[in-house]
Image: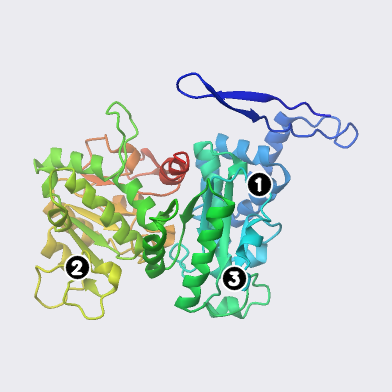
Amino acid sequence: MPVRTLTPRFDASGKMVKLEVSPEPRPQLARGLTPPRLNPNSHYERALAQLRSKDKPLERYIFMQQLKDADLDMFYRLTMDHMSEIVPVLYTPTVGDACLNFSHIYRRPDGLFISYEDKGRIGSILRNWPRRDEARMSVVTDGSRILGLGDLGINGMPISIGKLNLYVAGAGIRPSSVLPICLDLGTNNEKFLADPLYLGNPQKRVADQEMEEFMDEFMHEMSIHFPKLLVQFEDFSTDNAFKYLARFRNQYPVFNDDIQGTGAVVLGYALQASLVMRSGFVNAARLSSEASGRPLNEHRILFFGAGSAGVGVAMQLTSFFMLQGMTEDEARAQIWTVDSQGLITADRKNLAAHKKYFARTDYSGPPVKDLVEIIKLVKPTALMGLSTIHGAFTQEVVEVMAELNERPIIFPLSNPLTMRPAVVYHIESLNIGMPCLPWLHLNRLEAKTVDAVEETRQTLEDTSRREKDIGRSGVGAAFPGLSLLL
């Protein structure tokens, strides 16, 4: 019988507050049930070689999910030792393809699936989770707006799974404490409704009132069965993202990744000036101001994209200006937003509720739809890309930004990569003598453009043949940090 130990835990004063039972050691297979020369180190090399033998990202994703099910320790050992190689497999950009194909590549269950048919008995479904006492963080999606791919229904589950995989590998969250959840409230995706292999209920999305009742029950039952758990809403449709964050934020420990998480990462910066790795708008603004002599409170930010992520990041960045001593109204006046219909103004008819906060009241001319013309009108110091229009940051766009600013700030942030308005190597390929920097290298002052990219860590070669890294800090640090506060 395996021996389990009791470990004392003490508070700040040195008083013992509790005893924790150590986890039961993983059972070892009896001799003869494994090959005689099998050992962890050689098996590590074998698993890595098998992963690298797959020539398609989706095949690598499938392999890693199978490995997770078969050998959890090996899964995380590989991931943690080869983050720059495996993070793009487990999350963006590969996770988008995994979502699109989820019903066809599904092997084994991972997480909880809660259907609208479970309304009235959601508590009984939650009780089926085998590690309720250990659960501390859950990523919950309804699959209605996955990345920039639209309504994927239950096929959005890899988003919840993938994000929590990275929380464990990147931030040291215990694997047993995370809970991926997908809410099956239907889908309006006709392709999936017609797919005989689709794993969700083949029905249209439920009406708003029905969803409200379902969500109220879900959050109430979550608070009962998982009282120590933080809920992270992920990839809900824009209107519902704002709606349910406002509905529950003062009742339960909950946050919305798209609205608050991305904004926190974009705003964030290294607190210690000595750190080489700096990131976020705060440092970008400082570098830009150093080059131009412009005060920090005079930066003007133009958002290309006004969905939940765009407006959410804009809301977070108002705090940047308020930290400079500005009022909320003064801070809001430094931000402009653009959607598919052009510059957002308060006089536009049928304006969505979440777009009204940043709608401009100081422009009364004809609608302006062309991005270059909007830039010339607004004269922004920073251009933030959170749309799903790939290649929108054209050479002309970048050139105009460079003409207006000594050191413009360009953040192409949209996911997935195929829907990003620009990426580092695209901007650097524009032959305008203006190299572009990923956010891990904002301290390289020889560059004229300050560019930050929230994307999986990749090694790229720029036009000068120098290698650059593009980093991710959100899923590995900012988001799981919130769960550690509970």
Counting residues from the start of the chain, the first of labels 1 and 3 encountered is: 3
- Relative image position of residue 451 (x, y in whole percent): 28, 47
- Relative image position of residue 58 (x, y in whole percent): 60, 57
The residue under label 1 is 131
Q: Does the residue at mark 1 contact the one at mark 3 (Cβ under 8 Å)?
A: no
- SS assignment at label 1: loop
Counting residues from the start of the chain, the first of labels 2 and 1 encountered is: 1
Query: In the image, which disc is placed on residue 359?
Result: 2
Choose mark 1 or mark 3, whichever is in front.
3
Query: In the image, which disc is placed on residue 429?
Result: none
x 12%, y 48%: residue: 326
- State how far apart marks 3 and 2 are (Cα): 38 Å
Residue 16 appears left or right of 103? left
Amino acid marked by disc 1: Arg
Residue 117 appears left or right of 87? right
- State how far apart marks 1 and 3 are (Cα): 22 Å
Q: Does the residue at mark 3 contact the one at mark 2 (Cβ under 8 Å)?
A: no
The residue under label 3 is 119
Q: Quadrant of the N terminus?
A: top right
Mark 1 Cα-neighbour bin, 10 Å: few <14, some 14–19, many ≥20: few
